[in-house]
Each structure stands twice: as C-alpha cells, then as structure tokens.
Image (tube, coloured by chain):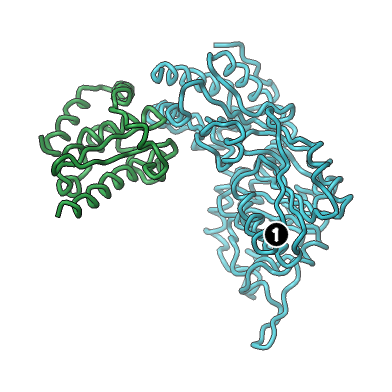
Amino acid sequence: MSQQTQTNTFEVEKIRKDFPILNRKVNGYPLVYFDNAATAQTPKQVMDAIVDYYSNYNANIHRGVHSLSQEATDKYEQARIKIQKHFNAEKAHEIIFTSGTTHGINLVASGFSSILKEGDEILVSAMEHHSNIVPWQMLCEKTGAKLKVIPMDQKGELVYSEFEKLISSNTKLVFLNHVSNALGTVNPIKSVIEKAHSVDAAVLIDGAQAAPHIKADVQALDMDFYVVSAHKMCGPTGVGILYGKEAWLEKLPPYQGGGEMIATVSFEKTTYAGLPHKFEAGTPNICGGIAFGAAIDYMNAIGFDEIAAYEHELLEYATNELKKIDGVKIYGEAAEKTAVISFNIEGLHPYDIGTLMDKMGIAVRTGHHCAQPVMDFFKIPGTVRASFSFYNTFHEIDLFIDALKKAKMMLQ
Amino acid sequence: MTIQEKQQEVIDEFSMFDDWMQRYEYMIELGKSLPLIDEKYKIDENLIKGCQSKVWVHAELEGNKLAFTADSDAIITKGIVAILIRVFSEQHPSEIIEADTKFIDEIGLKEHLSPTRANGLVSMIKQLKMYALAYQTQLN
C-alpha cells in the first residue's frame, strides 16, 4: 500500500479507544465506518453522561422544587452554556434546544410565515439537503413569497456572482448550508451574511455538516440563525440547537404551544415565557441536551484545529488513492471542503458498490443523499459517499480502497 | 414446476456456494441474464417505489398464468429481481398470492428483506403480488 503520512501529534489510536463500536465486526470484517456525515459515532464519555443522568438525577426540569429536578435543571442549563460558549453566542438564551437541524429550520420557517408577504423573496442555494428546500417551499406557498435558487458550478462551488445578482431589497431571507452534505463544499458564509445584511435580509445557516469539523463563531460571522444536530458531533440523535440573535428570537412568534413555553395561562389569554423557553414547549430531551454538552466537551478536549488538520490529511490521502482507480469520478472538488468524498465509478451503479462494500465491512452512504437537485445537476442517480471523522485512520482508507477495487472487479 | 419446487431449485443452487462473494457473483451473473423488459414498459408507472435503484416490472397474462418481465439500473438488484421472476413467473395468480418468501432467507439474502434496505426487495415482492391480485380478479 501507499506511503502513509499520518500526523505524529494526532493520537488517533488513543482516541479510538473511546469508541467501543469501532472494535466490532460487520459481516465478518472489521468495521470501517465512513458514514460520518450521516451520523457520527459516540464516545464513552458521552455514553457515561447518558448513564449518569438516568442513574443519578433523572427528573423533569424547570418546575420541580425537589433536589433531583433542580440537579437536572442545572445540568441541562450548564449544557446550554457549554454550547453557547462553543459557538460564542453572546447570551445563553440565544441557544434554543431543538430535536435537530430540521426542527430548527422549520421553527425559523414557521416564524417567518408571519413576517413575509407577497413579493418578498427567499434565496436558497442549489446544493441544499431536502430538509432545506421543502420548508421554504411550504413557506412560499403560504405567504406568496418567491423562492430563488443560487446556482453552483461544476466543482460544486456556489456561484457568488449570481448570488450578488439575485439579492435585492426584496430578499428577506437567505438560506445556505455552511457545508454541503452531498459534496463537502465549505460555503463562503461570511461574505454571504455581509451581503445579505446590506439589504437587511436575515440569514439562516445550516451548520449540520460543518459543526463536526469547524468551530463557528456566531458573533464574528454576525449570524442571524445557525442550526446544528448533536448526532453529527458525537452526541445522541434527537437533539440539536438553533442559535438565533436575541432580536430575531424576540421577533419570531412561538412555534409550538404547550408547557414550558408559557408565562400565564387563562382561557382568555396566554402570555408567553421569555427566551429560550418560548421556543421550548413541552418536556425537552433533557438527557440528550446534557449529552450534547458532554459531546462538545469531548470534541473541544481534542481540539477543532487538530481535528480539522488531521481530517484534511485523511481527505487528501483518500482522494489521491481514489483517483488512481480507473473510471472514478469525484463530485465536489471545491477548493475548500470538509472530509467528504462523493464519487462514482464509470458504468457502475452506486447502490451495487455500496452493497458489496457493506459485505466487506465498509459503511458508506449511497444514493442521492437527500439532495436530489444536486444529483440532477450532475445528471446522475446518486453517488457513493465516504465521509471521514477524526477517529478514522489511514489504514481504514487502505481497507476501503481494497474493498472498492474488489467490488469493481466483481461488478465489471 | 410449482413455486415451491422452483424455490427449492434456487435453494439447492445457492447451497453450493461457500461464501458471500460466490453468492453475489452468481447474483450478478443472474442479473446479466435477466430477460429484459420491453423498452415500452420501462415507464414511470411500472417503477417500483422504495428502491434506491430503479426497478421496472411488467406483468402479462398468458392463458391463466402470469408472466413477469423486469429490469433495473443496478446489477445486484437485477439479480434479485431475476430470482424473484424465476420463482414467480408463469404461475397462476392465486399461487403467486399465496406463496411465501422464506427461501430468500435460506439462500443467504436475508439482509435484503429488511424494510430499511434501499433495494426494496419487500416492495418488489409486494408489487408482484399486487399484479397477481389484479389479474386474479380479471380471471374470475
């Protein structure tokens, strides 16, 4: 196999010990988990936080006078502060716990339904996940606003000059992913936000694919809204956050009615609770929120700069090795991208490749990655997507390349 | 041959293989030899939903028996379709409706029966049975 260039300083073997699942076998082969963009694996430290919660202080929060309830409330609110600090939000109540990115997007879309009117415009990029397209279509149907699409080029980069042409005083909201899930492209969100603010448009950035690799500073970037899922960042599924600037969160109406989100209720009138509770109706995913905090601690202890540098090496190594295989075509070759490779082999269906790779213990994603417009752009039914995390190794990439060659041989 | 006998024939064939690789190589071969559906039937109405790859199935009555033709853009899926068609084609609709599909498990393709599998084997079987049901009504 090819020369390996593993970073000396990055202690991947030590890190791997935190992830029990990486020791298991799949179909008789050692698991090679390259579907990190779909969901990341969970380290022991996060599992410990979950077990600790249920073993020691499981209780409903924010309303009990008893000790367990207070402990649970403290831990949940501490997690909110950890997340606030991580994304450098100015205030803790600008962090709204959600069930995940999709929930956060829908919350903002629903809020804008009372703000938008006919003739207003929403801009979205051509490289969005379905969850980033459908809520806006629904919103446009409801309000009479128009949805406009910022195109991308063959490399999978946003055509910024087109964005500049599309944006106008009619634009009320710009929606863009920080990193594309299908292609790995890192979008120029700073320039997009600046430009959008120059016409007083709000910007919602989907950070689901970025957050595991890039530590976004919401104040430095002057973000209006940022949405993230915990499970992409070594946390549990079913929990995430919406960051919103205080002024925007005050302006948006509540999303769901229920407990937690009210101040006073009578049959004549209900007054709503302040932030963040206004958007957190019902009993939240308490354990999930706390575990999300633990996941953020875990990743920060390793360090996001270190993670990004190591993952970049994995990406370069895998890209070079893949390109040596005849017929491989990589989709998404942006200058700046995260550790994601979407590819096809000429004449072979991604589904066939993925099925055979699975038989050899390699977990990759195949299909349209919930981004059909991206696939339509490249005129393909789908791709094979390998996405790497900081606990993956160069050796695993070698196993992946070997399995891919074997699959190719069987299929041709 | 009855459906039961055909299933046994498939089980016997697959029992000769020692490992997954031989099984899949055989399926790929079967996929390549699948009697292709007439181009005019490769239309959206004949697409089976729930598959990551495209699968078209067409059914036609020949006397009182139902004949299937099919195609897919993925070769392994095509192999699976080929096995299904071999077992179910040219049978009386009532036989098709009543047939069980345990043989899939026995030939080591159980993983394709999970509802989460993107190839939609479950949807395919359902579709073949739906055709049988429709044609049985026509025969009665």
Look at 30% across and 38% down and name the residue there: B110
Q: Where does residue A334 sit, x and y in percent of width and height?
A: 71, 28
| Residue type at tag 1 | Val
Residue A304: which quarter of the image? Answer: top right
Residue identifier under label 1:
A108
Q: Where does residue A269 sit, x and y in percent of width and height?
A: 70, 85
Q: Secondary structure at mark 1?
A: helix
- What chain letter is assigned to the residue under label 1? A
Quadrant the C terminus of chain A occupies: top left
Task: Give the colour of chain A.
Answer: cyan
Q: Where does residue A229 sit, x and y in percent of width and height?
A: 63, 49
Look at 58% across and 16% down and name the residue there: A321
The chain in green = B
* Residue nearest the observer in this picture, B89 or A157: B89
| Residue B122 visible in image | yes
* Residue nearest the observer in this picture, B94 or A33: B94
The answer to whether residue A289 is left or right of residue B84 is right
* Residue nearest the observer in this picture, A181 or A6: A181
* Residue nearest the observer in this picture, A141 or A325: A141
